[in-house]
Image (cartoon, helix red, strand yellow):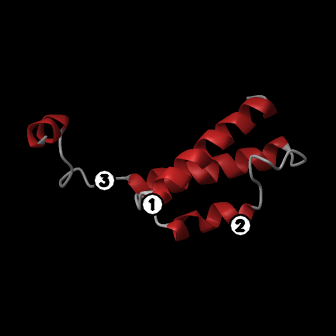
């Protein structure tokens, strides 16, 4: 992936992370490991590899924070029936 594409993905993931923290889907503290990397989408001077590391960490944190226990999760049919 080219650096400009990686920056775009980084920006999109960060937007999702902000929405998730605003809606309490993800605890703000869950993003600490991402913040420790110190690279944001606006860090244009950062190397491509640094952005790749930040994107991977952000994606991992978001994925782990939103995982559900299959035993307790609802199927799409159950969600539709509730509404």
Reading the image, the residue beneath label 3 is: 68
Judge whether 55 appears above or below 27 on screen: above
Q: Residue furthest right?
A: 45
Residue 38: image location, x then y, percent: 77, 61
Vertical position of residue 4 compared to residue 39: above or below: above
Tell which residue pokes out farthest to the left in this image: 81
Q: Going 18% across and 53% down the picture, which residue do you hit?
A: 71
Residue that label 2 marks: 36
Q: Name the image quarter holding residue 52.
A: top right
- Residue projecting furthest to the bottom: 29
**Disc 2 to disc 3, how far (Cα)?**
26 Å
Q: CA distance from mark 3 to mark 1?
A: 12 Å
**Mark seen at residue 26:** 1
Residue 54, image x, y percentages: 69, 51
Report if the CB atoms under discs 1 and 2 are less than 8 Å apart: no
Residue 49 lies left or right of residue 73; in this view the side is: right
Q: Quadrant of the N terminus?
A: top right
Residue 12 occupies quadrant: top right
What secondary structure is marked by label 1?
loop
Say whether disc 3 or disc 1 marks the residue closer to the N-terminus. Answer: 1
Q: Earlier in the sequence, mark 2 or mark 3?
A: 2
Residue visible at 19% across and 36% down in the picture: 76
Closer to the camera: disc 1 or disc 2?
A: 1
């Amino acid at each position: 992936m080219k650096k400009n594409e990686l920056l775009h993905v980084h920006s999109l993931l960060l937007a999702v992370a902000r929405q998730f923290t605003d809606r309490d889907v993800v605890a703000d503290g869950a993003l600490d490991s991402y913040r420790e990397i110190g690279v944001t989408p606006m860090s244009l001077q950062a190397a491509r590899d640094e952005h790749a590391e930040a994107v991977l960490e952000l994606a991992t944190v978001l994925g782990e924070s939103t995982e559900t226990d299959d035993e307790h999760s609802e199927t799409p049919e159950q969600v539709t029936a509730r509404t």
